[in-house]
Amino acid sequence: MRPERLDAPHIPRKEDLDGITHGRHGDPFSVLGMHLSGAEGAQRVEVRAFLPEAAEAWVVAQEGGSPYPMERIDPLGFFLARLPESRIFSYRIHLKTDEGTETEIHDPYAVGPVLTDYDLHLMGEGSHYKKYEKLGAHTMEFHGVRGVHFAVWAPNATSVTVMGDFNRWDNRRHPMRFLESSGIWEIFVPGLGEGQIYKFYVRSRYQEYEAVKADPYGFCFEQRPKSASVVWDINKYQWQDTAWMVKRPQTNWFESPMS
């Protein structure tokens, strides 16, 4: 990666910068990711990322071309690049750590919500009978990228982040999107898979209460004394109850023994 100098980026507002770097921002998707910035008719693309593990970072266009260097504008690890583009495009972030390790990641703040308005409507009226398929942690492919979708109901929180080994249990690293009409927080984290351990870090709007919580919709958990949730795919289980399912509608349950 050989950086080439571009125009100086616009510095975000101090309250946004502090909110992201200290894990307090309630709307991280409005700050992080790719955005159009500048006056109408002269807008440029900006990419913003919070990468406390990175010493250097570059924006790499999915369609190819030279990488764009990102400037570290905060010592806690907020990176920003203003690009000579005026359109939104698919990209990845190439980063180099202080230890010299280099890796390339898909930006979780480059994608829209996973839960649909219909899902939120059914949950709001209490008629979504398969909430376990939407809340919790689910491995999935979203916009052609494999990863894990996290969702948790926390209507009285000011911010929620998901933390685990994948982000060094840093409660600032992956703040979630608030779907205000439903009280649900969600995020899709590319590159994760089954077996990842995680918890939610919740900041309450009441009395500045903060807590680390296991997932109430988790399908798998660590054994005591550990207490983290574990990403698990329950759909891979092969049921062996075909004969019982065939017999079930033929049984008069009102005149049969319970056991």
Image (spheres, rainbow, N blue to C red):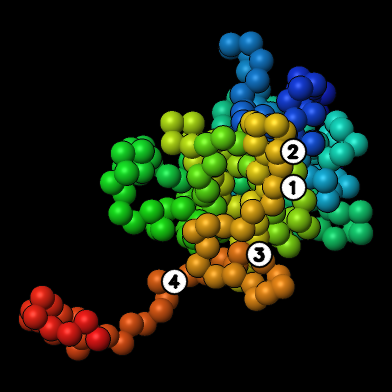
Foreground disc of the pair 4, 3: 3
The amino acid beneath tag 3 is Ala
Residue 66 position, x and y percent, is 73, 43
Q: Within 10 Å of the Cα at label 3, are there few (<14), some (14-19), or many (20+) other Cα atoms?
A: many
| Residue at which label 1 appears | 171
Q: Is residue 143 left or right of residue 88?
A: left
Which residue occupies the foreground of this view, 240 or 126?
126
Q: Is residue 248 left or right of residue 14?
A: left
Query: Do the CB atoms of the residues marked 4 and 3 lie less than 8 Å apart?
Result: no
Image point (61%, 64%), residue name: 229
| Residue at which label 2 appears | 23
| Residue at which label 3 appears | 228
How far apart, in angstroms, are the residues tagged by discs 2 and 4? Answer: 32 Å
**Which quadrant does the C terminus fall into?**
bottom left
The amino acid beneath tag 4 is Ile
How far apart, in angstroms, are the residues tagged by discs 1 and 4? Answer: 27 Å
Q: Secondary structure at mark 2?
A: loop
Query: Do the CB atoms of the residues marked 2 and 1 lie less than 8 Å apart?
Result: yes
| Residue at which label 4 appears | 234
Q: Secondary structure at mark 3?
A: loop
Q: Within 10 Å of the Cα at label 2, are there few (<14), some (14-19), or many (20+) other Cα atoms?
A: many
How far apart, in angstroms, are the residues tagged by discs 2 and 3? Answer: 20 Å
Which residue occupies the foreground of this view, 224 or 191?
224
Above or below residue 199? Residue 201 is above
User: Looking at the image, is mark 2 or mark 4 earlier in the sequence?
Assistant: 2
Residue 169 position, x and y percent, is 76, 56
Above or below residue 80? Residue 104 is below
